[in-house]
Image (cartoon, coloured by chain):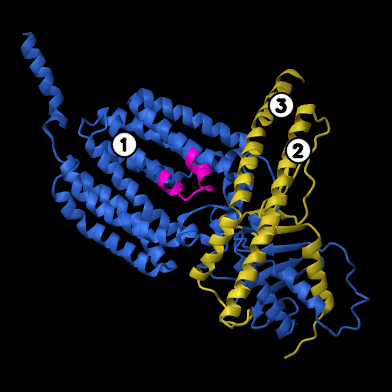
Amino acid sequence: MKNIINFRYVQNLANSLNRCACIIQFRDLHNQGKSELHIYNVPPPSKKYDLIGPPDKKSNLRPVVFHVPQKETALQCRYRLMRKETHDWNQAFWANHNERFFKEKEDFVRRKLDDKQQTVDSAEARLSADELSEFYKAFLDKNYPLHANYNREWYHKNLRLLFPAFQVFLEKIYNKLFKR
Amino acid sequence: MKKVLTPNHGLIAKTRCVSSKTNLKTEDDQGTAFPEQMTHIKYASKGLEKFPQKYKQVPLTLFIKKSKTLVMLDEISEKFTVTFPKSEDTLTVDIGPEDFAKLKNMLEKDKRDSSPAHNPESITECIWQEMKTDNNKLMQYYFRLSKIRLTGLVVLTAMAGYAMAPAAFDPIGFTMVTLGTGLTSASANAINQFFEVPFDSQMNRTKNRVLVRGYLSPLHAVTFAAVSGSVGLVVLALGANPLTAALGAFNLGLYTLVYTPMKRHTILNTWVGSVVGAVPPLMGWAACTGSLDPGAWIMAAIMFCWQFPHFNALSWNLRPDYSRAGYRMMSVVDPNLCKRVALRHTVGITGLCFLAPVAGLTTPLFPVMSLPLNLYFTYLGWKFYQQGDSSSSRSLFRFSLLHIPLLILLMIVNKPSRKNDSKDSGKESVTVVQSELT
């Protein structure tokens, strides 16, 4: 029984889900209470806190939207900029790195399957784990200097953020206690 | 079997992408009766945050507030059926076999990529959240930060070390070493998680760690580590003895400052990690007797050897993740070595159990009792060496989790009874002193 596809319904449904903030209602079977879980596909405005989002498709890192308070002090500003810089640097590295990984993996699979005289899209086109492990080893070895460099930089940036964070924390307490 | 749409896969959004590309013959879609404004969609579920397979899957139900219709989405073969219960209409979204195949392929490709961004397991992974520390869940976050299950196992091995030591059982000393070891281990794991945030984000196994998700700030995690580490070491120093505290501090430093960075530089990290696993029994022993006897070293050696089949089997199936995240593990860099080392050390455990009575750790009955266990473990190691596939590695790993508690139990059962570690010894020495004084 072929029904008429009502494009309006489908379009409306899809647009709503994709574009706007949706209110999702969870009906909890256990206590029959209603709780609302707000799901946003764009960062919602926050009055006081930073926001952390779903993992980025390329870098797998979670993006952070930094909240800039009205009366931001110099220390807070410096800390926020350092964090932003670290996040951006991390994001750039991993996005690039992961792209290269998947591209090189595809190339490797293609080459191997050509050697075995099979096409990539056929159903049996699967390399065994052992064959793939050659690629994994080659990738690791090729990227070792890059990884070592990244490590050094990451440890340095990560540890460098601790003291400003501590300063911001102390300042917050000081302001709460002494400035009313 | 009916496959059901779940929001986790984002299928609905993808359906839109695909269906808008098909040639749907709709002449009247321009003048829509539904102006493009916000439609509030409510979604009723069983209230389960995760959707594990064992629960009966229900069709995705949507409540469209504006038109007050309840919509149930259910997939039947290649068509998505949208049912309107009120008017009992059925809308069949037929996106055509090629588009459907493309859609399926997109999903399969995402799954193949196996990176965390493409494999959401729960809706909370896909949403924006405020980075606000939830104080109600603080204990839960601390447990996760300290990898509580791993810490628990470390504490168990320390307790085993204490139990096997040939000295009197002191409940206070026992509690102190347990507490101290637990706190030190928690601190080490928290520091490890602090150092490895971007790498944990890359792997499915670790993508939900506390710092990756932003439930705690890095400063908070480091403070937790500093406090629990220092308290743990002080407890060990005062409650047990300085040797135990020194061992604890050594282990903490080895794990956080040597093993963690080394994971990204050389495969030797596995050996260092195995030393880290071997130290807790030494700590328990030192807390009891104040010195490290040959028996302690045998026990530590058994723990050291056990780490290899355990970890090599675990890492076998994680090769894609390790490679992409940049970890240098034997399973990726030298798979043959990985299998050889695992087998070698299963044989090593069997041999060491025979040395145990020689060092005075256990009675001679222990090697005999533990032989079946060790032989089966060696057999699984042999199968892993021969086959080197995911199933053999998984069975080796699973059995390793069973093997070590049973082995420790057998050790404790076969502990040699000594005259000078019974409860009467205290009274004996007191009466001797009294008789000498009078």
Task: Give x and y (percent) for residue A119.
Answer: 62, 82
Q: Colour of chain A?
A: yellow
Q: Chain of mark 1?
A: B
What's the magenta region? Answer: B258-272
Q: Residue B28 lies in magenta, yes or no?
A: no
In the image, is residue B231 above or below residue B80? above
Name the mark nearer the viewer: 1 or 3.
1
Q: Label 3, on which residue?
A: A172
Question: In the image, what residue occupies the spot 72% across and 51% down?
Answer: A92
Question: Which of the 4 image quarters holds residue B437?
Answer: top left
N-term-proximal mark, 3 vs 2: 2
In the image, is residue B111 above or below residue B199? below
Question: Which of the 4 image quarters holds residue B211?
Answer: top right
Supply the letter of whichever chain is blue: B
Is residue A53 found left or right of B311 in the rendered image?
Answer: right
Q: Amino acid at mark 1?
A: Leu
Q: Amino acid at mark 2?
A: Lys
Task: Give x and y (percent) for residue A43.
Answer: 77, 51
Name the mark nearer the viewer: 3 or 2.
3
Task: Give x and y (percent) for residue B216.
Answer: 61, 40
B29, B360: nearer the viewer: B360
Q: Label 2, on which residue?
A: A48
Q: Chain of mark 2?
A: A
Distance (Cα) linking label 1 and label 3: 44 Å
Callout 3 touching callout 2 (CB < 8 Å):
no
Task: Give x and y (percent) for residue B197.
Answer: 60, 46
Is residue A173 found left or right of B323 in the rendered image?
Answer: right
Badge 2: residue crowd in 10 Å (few <14, some 14–19, many ≥20) = some
Q: Residue furthest top?
A: B438
